[in-house]
Amino acid sequence: MSILRNLNNPLMIGIWLVLFITGLSALFFARWELALVSWATLVLALSPPLLAARWSLSLPLPFLLATTLFCIASIFLGEAFDFYERFWWWDLVLHGSSAIGIGLCGFLFVFMLFEGDSFAAPPSAIAFMTFCVAMTTGALWEVFEFLMDSFFGLNMQKSGLPDTMEDMMLNAVGGILAAVAGYIFMTRPHPGLLGGVIGRFIEMNARRYQKFRNRRR
């Protein structure tokens, strides 16, 4: 049932179908690089709902839409249509926003390990683990960019080391913001905008955070 909840939205299906058709068309017209980028974008866009289904999680529609649009903007538009070179701010906006999103996912994952029990570990410790998860995920993405450039002739790293280090610094900022948002969510009655995003996910997956919900009642 979880996989149906995550994959049955008409808007998301439409976006994924466009990527699928683009990949097939690129193969038909021998546009090999466009085909590779289209299929890579589709696989990455489908990964969150499929992984969520594997773990019996429900994902909010804004999260699914955001991850799919990020994959399209980063790989499809960024690489196939060279938006990274056309717009100097493209890479900064994508990495800045994705870093916050990755950090929030890191907090939800770490908090889930404790079933939402903020007494099992101090809020400061959970916030620190959130930052670590965000940085690790960001580092893995940089490895992915390096492999794509090395094996498929793309230019995801742009200027090489300077681009990688800028991305890692943005990941750090996003991880810190997410960690602070998670800390405020655990310790304050009014968690703010990012805290509201966290609360929405917890409501949709209440059984994973039962101890936290019991304490809030």
Image (tube, grey):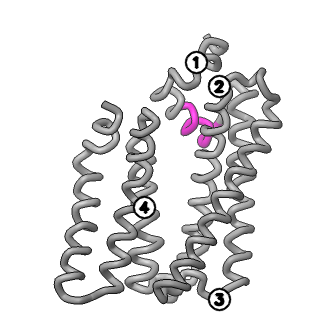
Label 1 environment density (alpha carbons within 10 Å; few <14, some 14–19, many ≥20): some
The residue at 65%/31% (across/down) is 113
CA separation in Å, label 3 and label 1: 47 Å
Q: Amino acid at mark 2?
A: Gly
Relative horizontal placement of residue 163, taking residue 155 as reference (left or right): right
Q: Which mark is residue 116?
A: 2
Label 3 environment density (alpha carbons within 10 Å; few <14, some 14–19, many ≥20): few
Q: Look at the numbered disc 4 and give the secondary structure of its residue.
A: helix
CA separation in Å, label 1 and label 2: 7 Å
The residue at 60%/79% (across/down) is 146
Q: Which residue is mark 4?
A: 44
Q: Which residues are magenta?
A: 192-199
Query: In the image, is residue 115 above or below residue 61?
Result: above
Query: In the image, is residue 93 above or below residue 46?
Result: below
Q: Is residue 86 visible to us here?
A: no
CA separation in Å, label 3 and label 2: 42 Å
Relative horizontal placement of residue 191, taking residue 46 as reference (left or right): right
Q: Amino acid at mark 4?
A: Leu
Q: Which residue is mark 3?
A: 159
The residue at 35%/33% (across/down) is 2
